[in-house]
Image (cartoon, rainbow, N blue to C red):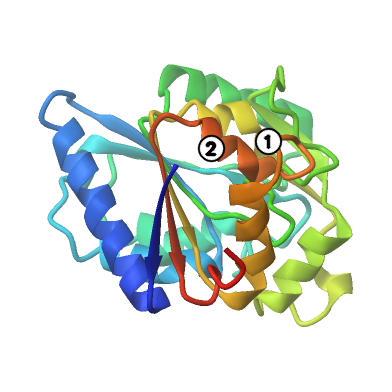
Amino acid sequence: MEVNVFNSRLEMGQDAAERVAHKINELLQSKEQINMIFAAAPSQNEFLEALLTKKIDWSRINAFHMDEYIGLDSAAPQGFGNFLRDRLFGKVPFAMVQYLNGNAAAPEEECKRYAAILKNFPADICCMGIGENTHLAFNDPHVADFNDPEMVKVVELDLECRQQQVNDGCFTELSEVPTHALTLTVPTLFAAKYAYCMVPGEKKAPAIQHTLNADITETFPSTILRNHPQAILFIDEASSALI
């Protein structure tokens, strides 16, 4: 896996945006439309802000997000669909934006609905982060499955994952963080032809250390990225401190 280390979050986000924009425009030279999956987290802020400044024909891109809380108020800013709507999806004219509904009456049916759309629009590019517990999307170690038969599933969030949402400033205390979520599974994320992974901040340093050095197992879900033929990792000085 290609690893790029930057002095700051800002430099990291700007370089990642430049690389992603170049790949988008390269793919659009040979395809009428492309499909992209985006992560929703503070770790993506600099990248998303920089991506908006690039010359991209957004009207030829179909957009998806990779996870959503179950049972959170539909207007809550912590909702991942809302996060991406505010920072990207609502700012440029995508051909299509598909939202995961964390308040669906039947979460398992919502998973099937979203999976069916993803099958029809296979991902070309996935823009992601890595959790403090090395999760990808909400595939925490206890639910991650590198050979998952499902494309989208309901998961229970582990304590470290929920605490990260407090650490990131998304919630003020642990009791506010939902306990369950919908997530694209590891194989669904891995199937994207190109994976760009933006992971800044000192709290991510142990996760980066495991990502690059631990055995490739579900104990550290992000290690699977080392098997991806086109995965690029973008980290800053703080998140690279232990490598």
Quadrant of the snapshot with the C terminus: bottom right
Q: Position of residue 25 (x, y in %)?
A: 15, 41
Q: Amino acid at mark 1?
A: Ile
Q: Position of residue 183 (x, y in %)?
A: 67, 40
Residue at 72 percent across and 26 percent down: it is: 109
> Can residue 137 be seen here?
no
Q: Position of residue 159 (x, y in %)?
A: 87, 61
Q: Which mark is drawn over residue 191? A: none
Indicate the secondary structure of the residue bearing disc 2: helix
Drawn side of residue 163 relative to residue 101, left or right = right
Q: Amino acid at mark 2?
A: Arg
Indicate the secondary structure of the residue bearing disc 1: loop
Drawn side of residue 117 relative to residue 153, left or right = left
- Asked whether 193 or 185 is in front, the reply is 193
Residue at 40 percent across and 65 percent down: it is: 5
Answer few, some or many: residues within 10 Å of disc 2's Cα (few below 14, many 20 plus, some between 14 and 19): some
Q: Which mark is drawn over residue 226? A: 2
Residue at 32 percent across and 73 percent down: it is: 11
Instruction: Give residue 6's quadrant in the image.
Output: bottom left
Instruction: Give residue 41's quadrant in the image.
Output: bottom right
Calculate the distance from the C-alpha at mark 2 to the C-alpha at mark 1. Answer: 8 Å
Q: Marks 1 and 2: in contact by CB < 8 Å? A: yes
Quadrant of the snapshot with the N terminus: top left
Residue at 28 percent across and 67 percent down: it is: 14
Drawn side of residue 206 relative to residue 60, left or right = right
- Asked whether 107 or 180 is in front, the reply is 180
- Asked whether 122 or 234 is in front, the reply is 234
